[in-house]
Amino acid sequence: MSAARSSLWGVRIDLHTHSAVSDGTDAPAELVAAAGRAGLEVVALTDHDTWDGWDEAQRAGERLGVEVWPGLELSAHELFAGEQRAVHVLGYGVDPSDRELGGLLERVRQGRRQRIPKMVAGLNRLGLELTVEEVMALAGTGVVGRPHLADAMIARGYVAHREEAFDRWLRDDGPLVVHRLTPSTEQAVAAIRAAGGAAVLAHPWGRGAARWLTPNRIEQLARDHGLAGLEADHLNHDVAQRAALRRLAERLGLLVTGSSDYHGTGKRNFPLGAHTTAPEVYAELRCRAGSHRRTVGRAAGVYGGPGRPRGTGPDDDTRLMTQGETDESDRDRRRG
Ligand SMILES: [Zn+2]
Ligand SMILES: [Zn+2]
């Protein structure tokens, strides 16, 4: 197992990829085959808010001699100037039988589904003809998201590719902001840790996110909530940002990962292995995932204090996430 061969030089590890189970375009098995062709020995499948691709990916990995580390990319948010801003938290090595994390993922996916009709209505108001059915058909049985809305816009000929759809219409601070239900960043980190996983901030400073994920905020997430690492080496970061994130990680004792954020043909110029993670870091992450199972998340008190048995009391995730709901309805009212 690769975790044991931590001193091996030249092992190529990509810890952030998406399959068609979320908004990538390769089936999980195709993605693993592509990882092998790209010369990767280890690949983590990190679809948005789901682990549904794990089995297929792991079976393909066994067949093809590529080590597949199951992960996910959990949607979360920070509040910045009174608005919700998207944050993505990579979770590695979580237990898929963890009911609390499973329930949280289900609610986040439901929020994704509920957002689509609102966004379609918004696009209609802006003069773009489009239906919810078109978007859902493109998502298939997988997790629906804005990229599928972009795909529907491409199919209609409104834009040439997903980036254009995001730049013109779908970006967080664009003309069509519709919030959805997500946990706060610390809730996301805690949920991953409570399910036995290690949490890493995905592309922390990509697309202007340095405004809300400040060094102080990252320090708080590391010190108080058990964040394990920062994905510094990501194509959305320039060289200076990557260097600054490395310095910050070193100061805070955080691990530094690198990866591609591959989406198949869904994201141009994000090839598998575009960035990689050092074998020592991978070994350490594997070590941390599983070493604190069902203890640290409780102790952090995020779900109502240490030691409270699971599955008792009110549904804390729902209660904690109503903030997003409130913001959304406030915003809808403001936007009239
Ligand atoms: Zn992301
Ligand atoms: Zn991603």
Image (tube, rainbow, N blue to C red):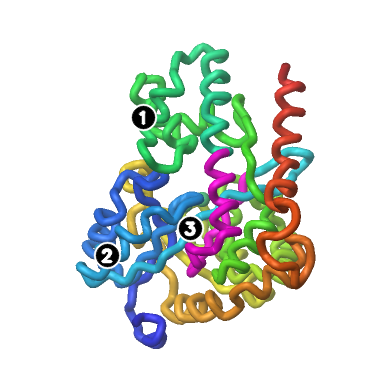
Q: Position of residue 242 (x, y in %)?
A: 55, 62
Residue position marked by numbered label 1 in the rendering: 137
Residue position marked by numbered label 2 in the rendering: 59
| Residue at 75% in and 68% down | 308
Type of amino acid under label 1: Ala
In the image, the segment drawn in magenta is: 86-110
| Residue at 50% in and 67% down | 95
Type of amino acid under label 2: Arg
Which secondary structure lies at badge 2? Answer: helix
Give the CA separation, mark 2 to mark 1: 27 Å
Asked whether 295 or 11 is in front, the reply is 295
- Is residue 93 located in the magenta-colored stretch of the structure? yes
**Which is nearer the N-term, disc 2 or disc 1?**
2
Rendered position, 154 above or below 217:
above
Q: Position of residue 125 (x, y in %)?
A: 57, 13
Which secondary structure lies at badge 3? Answer: strand
Residue position marked by numbered label 3 in the rendering: 72
How packed is label 1: few (under 14 Cα within 10 Å), some, or many (20 or more)?
A: few
How packed is label 2: few (under 14 Cα within 10 Å), some, or many (20 or more)?
A: some
